[in-house]
Amino acid sequence: MDNNDILRRIRYTFNFDDTKMMSIFASAGKNATREEISDWLKKEEDEAFQQCIDSDFALFLNGLINDKRGKREGAQPEPEKTLTNNIIFKKLKIALNLKDQDILDFMKLADFKIGKHELSALFRKPSHKNYRECKDQILRNFLKGAQVKYRADEKEIKSSEVQEESKESSSNQAIWNK
């Protein structure tokens, strides 16, 4: 998966607008412009499309961690110059404060089966004998499961708000009919 595709999926999953995207980058020390972000979010066929390089995407992920978990004290981590799916997956896990079972649940939402041992191998150091490379399919299904989870939660909140308004409207109508 390329950085631009993941950036688009994260933006959609969490319903981030341009201002939010700029603030996420800023929290990691990059002053990304609206135009830069817009160009990164465009499809490859668009002539204004710009590739989001690894160091910029690493800054976004660091900013997402800062946004979701709070900025850590002291010096901020240096962005990686080269990203792998394993690093991206690990940063998303940290940002969303997920445990292994949460990730397995996301995978289940995407109709993708992965074992706990297979999952833990993705988060090991590359020098570890049981380290496994995170393939695009795994990261794609994780992002799909996150989308199902977080977008569904958003729909449930809106649905419950509409139901509350409907109940309130009905009770007000009943009062007026007396």
Image: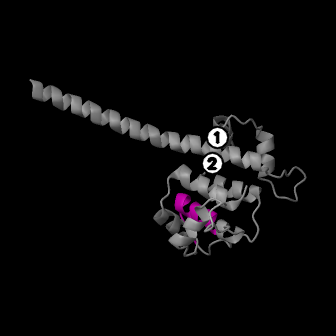
At which x and y percent is residue 150? Answer: 53, 44
Q: Does 135 lie within the magenta span? A: no
Residue 156 place in picture, x, y as percent: 45, 37
C-beta proximity under 8 Å, tags 1 and 2: yes
Q: Main secondary structure of the magenta part?
A: helix
Q: Does residue 167 appear left or right of residue 117 in this picture? A: left
Residue hosting label 2: 98
Rendered view: 115 above or below 9: above
Q: Quadrant of residue 100?
A: top right
Instruction: Give the camera-side residue of 167 and 121.
Output: 167
Q: Is residue 34 left or right of residue 95?
A: left
Mark 2 surroundings: few (<14), some (14-19) or many (≥20) residues within 10 A:
few
Q: Is residue 114 depicted above or below 42 in this figure?
A: above
The span shown in magenta is 59-73
- Disc 2 marks a residue whose amino acid type is Leu
Amino acid type of the residue tagged 1 in the rendering: Phe
Mark 1 surroundings: few (<14), some (14-19) or many (≥20) residues within 10 A: many
Which residue is depicted at the point 68% across and 61% down? 3
Q: Is residue 46 above or below residue 177?
A: below
In the image, 122: left or right of 16?
right
From the top left corner, tell me how far across and down residue 1 is, in percent: 73, 55
Residue 89 position within the rendered picture, expressed as x and y whole percent measured from the top left: 70, 54
Task: Tell me how far mark 1 sits from mark 2, CA to CA.
Answer: 10 Å
Q: Residue furthest left?
A: 178
Residue at 63% x, 67% y: name it: 47
